[in-house]
Image (cartoon, helix red, strand yellow):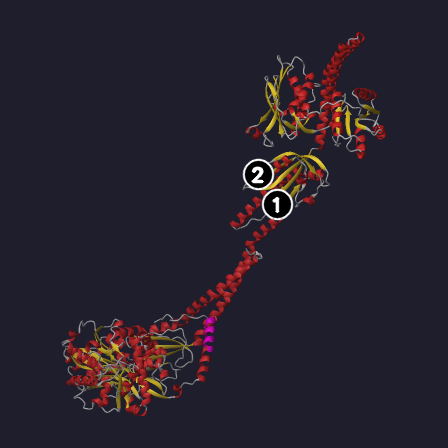
Amino acid sequence: MPVFPSISLSKAWYALIFVASLLPAFIIAPWLADKAYELLFERALLKEEVYHKQIEAYFSLETERLLSVLVNKADPIALDIGSAQAFTADKNTTTINLLHRLMKREYLFNTVTLYDNHANIMTSVTHGEHAIADISVQSPAFVVSQHGRTFIGSPLHLADHHFEFLIAVPLIVQGNVVGSMVTTVNTLEFWQNIQKRVTPPEGNMLYLIDGRGILLAHSLASSLHPGDLLTDKVIVRALLSHKNWNSSQAYQGFDQPKVFGIGSHINNLSWSVISEVSEPRIMLPIEKALSYLIFIVFIMHIIFGLLAIFLVRKMLKPIHDLSQAMQYAKEGNYQVVLPHSAYSELQNLIQHFTSMTQTIAKRESELQQFLLALEHLGESILITDKHGIAHYINRSFKKTTGYTDNILGKPIQALEKSSMRHTAYQHLKHCIKTGESWEGRATSVKANGEEFSSRMHISPVFEHNNTITHFVTIIQDMTQYDLLEAQLLQAQKTESIGTLVGGIAHDFNNNLAVIMGNTYLAKISIRAGKNQDTLEKINNIESLSKYAAKVVAQLMAYARQDIIQKENIRLNTVIKESLLLSNVAIPENISCTTNIADDDGLIFADKSQIQQMLMNLLNNARDALKEATQPLIELTLKSELVDKDFHKRNPSISTLHFMRLSIQDNGHGISEEVLPLIFDPFFTTKDVGSGTGLGLSMVFGMVQSHHGIIEVDSRLGKGTTFHIYFPMVKNEEGSAQNVDLPHQQHAQDETILLIDDDDDVRETTAEVLESLGYHVIQANDGLQGLQYFKQHADIAVIIVDVIMPHMGGVAFAQKLRESHPDIGIIFLTGYDKSAILSEQYIPHTSTLHKPIDFEQLQHAIQNILSIAEPK
Amino acid sequence: MKNVPTSPLPSLKHTSIYSFSWLILAALLSSCTEQEPSASTQAEPINIGRLICGGHLSLAVVENKYQHDLQNFTLHTVQNHNWDDVIQDMRSGKLAGTFILSPLAMQLIRQGLDAKIVMMADRNGNGFVLAKKYKSIQALKGKKTIIAVPHLYSQHHVLLYLTLQQHDVAYNDVTVVAMPPRDMISSFARGEIDGFMVGEPKGNRSISLNKGWMAAISPSIWPNHMDHVFLASNTFIKEHPHQLQELINALKKAGNFIEQHPHEAAIMGEAYTGARAQVFEQVLTTPANWIDYSDMIPSDTHMQAMAKIMVDMGLWKDMPKDLNTYTDTSFIRKATVLYP
């Protein structure tokens, strides 16, 4: 669609007014001018028309009058005559006197002649020397009057050179026509007599013509002569056709070049009267009037134009003000007060606009508040469009990530750069595509490339038509939180240790007592030479020592400071091991039952955290059972395929296969008011000094860090059950427990380099190895070990303590690997092996815990020897 | 009296534009005229007499439409006041020819006028108007009525005579008065006469003015009777035969045009017939033979018939022996060949 350049509304209005003014100027004005001309023309000729009407009337009246005069005189004359044959001038003096009186009274009669029935003149009276009409028996005047009828003839040019017309009346006595009285009337005098009675308009030329088109009379100024035939004139021809003439067209007049004519047919005589007025006489006033009219129209045009401009300006002012107000509103100023408009539509517009700006101002204020809140929110906010183009970042985002406003309008790569589990990332993408919200942990990347732990919440923003327009991402920097959580975990561990110590000390004391007892008995047996008894006691001591070593190993694992060391573990094994440790914290008065399914399902988890969770939950259960009459803790572990309801409750889950760990007690239960608060950090219902309020909070965090779900069922007075769901992973690697140990082989004096800074341990170990048939070279640190290794080329296996002064086991191994990448190394450590060796994998090594299980050591040595070539 | 202007009044501006346009057109026409001067403008004028009469319509058509056919002379029509003037002008030689009443032409020739009837102007074309008090022509029987005719030696008088005979009205029951047709209607309206036999469209105009009724039209009295004729002086015939032939040709052509285009012809002859166009158009068309401009040859049969009735009426005491010399039909016969 073409886009036309916009023009000012006022200019458009002025143009419209101008164009609209052209309409009357070019269409209406000519029409009005025509009408005005017509009216003025008719007005100019109106006097002439009135004059003609009067002339017509007087013609009729005058001829009737003359006829009446004659008829009135005819009767006494007829009586006086009696019969035509008897007429003599001497005898009929009455007739003669009547005729003379008639002629005296009626000067229009030029002659009066009496005819007998044979058209013979009986007597005649004349004015002056006027000639009488030439009447014969065939003359219409005679014939008609002889039939007892009156007759008015057409004008005739008589012998006296005058145009006269005849009036004939019969002379009737007792019903018999005895003669005819014929008068001649001077046409010119007759015309002048009528003219005396009617005032002709000034400046016109008058012409009287008969039915043949012959001029009978005219104005004095005319150059024509009576008797002229005027049938070559159009106006005369029209009148001869009994058509009046009143044309608006000027024509060549009788005496003037351009005239307007009025022609009237006088019906009773078939004569016609013509008035001719010179064209200038008609047109000059008309043109003058039209000039005035044009001037007035022009002035009116100007006035109306100015008025229209004024009205348009007045009408457009509110629109201009409105436009100005919109400009102000665009700049954020909504406080402009618009003046009241006299036009209802505009006033409505102003009211609506004012209302709209007030609403916008209110909404903008609210929006500003929201924006300020967003801006100052502790969480980082990122708003992108559906294509990932950044539209908004708040202050916290900038502070956390180091990004600036420069990224606005650019695609955000933070998510792509964020590290998270593949399944979680796929889930995130799925959620975004389907318009669902996503929440989860991720490692985000700052502007400088530094990674940080974060929690993200990504929500789509929908339009009215349910299409996604934007995404709002809330990023919470979890670095401090994780640190705090670790500290809390450590504190919890420390708290737990207090509980543990009592139980462990009890167990250790018991163990030590048994060991000491067996040692005492062994001595006695040795002295007594009872080797079998001695061996039995020593086996007891060994068994008790192993148990003690196991407890110590678990304590070490429990107490280590690593945060999360996840690996695929068999939960039932871990739970079983943990229960061994936890049992010491459960008073013996509490019945503790376990229902652990023989399921080898794997979960991806940190074993120590699992142990910590279990410890915390058991501690809570224990604490809840203090007042229970028959305290009971029931632990259940089994794999479970969760249902749709579970999925609905927990839409963020990525699998339906879970290992469910449930710990149920029949303690006092948790009230509904407290239930929502139990996972809050530092929330506790225990007495002061009895709990930190961190236990369940840590459990909750740990479950979440394992992408697990924790649910609580609790009824006050009935007990509480915690359900923890751990997502299962595929059994990709075989259980370590299923790995077959290499077949036990006897030593063949292979040389072993044993490196340990603890002399007792080293010497004892060396003594055992030598007793097994190995040749042992001892070194007290890594440096010395390297030195001995160089000196003894037959060393087949190296057993090295991990933690040593000068050079530890790992550094030693790395150094040694530089020259001997394949030699077998067995690490010994009193710490958790993963804590020591997790950072760098060193091939052809194995790790054993202290105190050393010599059978395992033997297996490890044999295993190395079986796969490694001697040096 | 007031007539609404027949053409729209132009504005001053329009008037100026129209005037300017006409000036340009006039200039173009004048320049054309200068380049091709018409022969007729330089030709000798020939006066032809006529009266205001429907029978003379063909001359009006020639004057308005076929002037360019007249190559060898300029037609100048002279409208006379009455038949006496026509007779006088023919006798004086002022007119080379004239349209005239056929009995009057025959009477003039018999009286010695050196002229011949060279063609008929029309056939039929007359009407008998009676006052409304006379419901039929028979009603005139026994009444002393006055009937006007244009001239005593007129076909109208002959027709009146015939129709009275046809309606068993004694000729003596009617007083015939000769009166110019222009006076008939006003005289009739004043009651001076009881009716009139006249050439159209006078009779029909009287009817249109609601004065009288049409008692008979001439085709019903004497079908195809000779009406007006064109009387040419022998001088014109002998000295200007080519001009006369041109004129007769044009008149024959005009007669054909009238028959084929009665509407246009009526408008064209409005000023000649003395009647409004629509009145005369009705005469031309309803009935079709009321007035006829075809077959303009004044045959001996026509002449004999007219002469016989004139004798019967007493207008002539006897039949002239040289009646065949009263006519010269050679011109109209040639024209009829050219424009059948």
- Residue A447 appears left or right of A794: left
Q: Is residue A425 above or below residue A272?
A: above
Q: Quadrant of residue A15?
A: bottom right
Q: 10 Å neighbourhood of mark 1: few (<14), some, or many (≥20)?
A: many
The local secondary structure at tag 1 comes to loop
Report if residue B18 lies within the magenta region: yes
Residue B52 numbered mark, or none? none
Res A194 visible:
no
Query: In the figure, residue A791 lies in which quadrant?
Result: top right
Quarter containing the C terminus of chain B? bottom left
Is residue B308 shown left or right of residue A30? left
- What's the magenta region? B12-24
Amino acid identity at mark 1: Tyr
Q: Is A513 placed above or below A446 here?
A: above
Q: Position of residue A643 (x, y in %)?
A: 55, 28
In this rendered view, identify the residue nearer to me: B266 or A816: A816
Circle 2 marks a residue in which chain? A
> In x, y percent, where is residue A94?
19, 82
| Magenta span dominant secondary structure | helix
Query: Which amino acid, by three-letter code, is at mark 2?
Result: Thr
Q: Residues within 10 Å of mark 2 (few under 14, many from 20)?
A: few
In this view, the residue in front, B23 or B190, is B23
Residue B18, image x, y percentages: 45, 73
Work out how far the residue at label 1 is from the one at label 2, CA to CA, in angstroms: 40 Å
Q: Tell me the quarter of the image containing the N terminus of chain B.
A: bottom left
Which residue is disc 2 drawn over? A434
Vertical placement of A456 versus B223: above or below? above
Q: What residue does disc 1 label?
A: A334
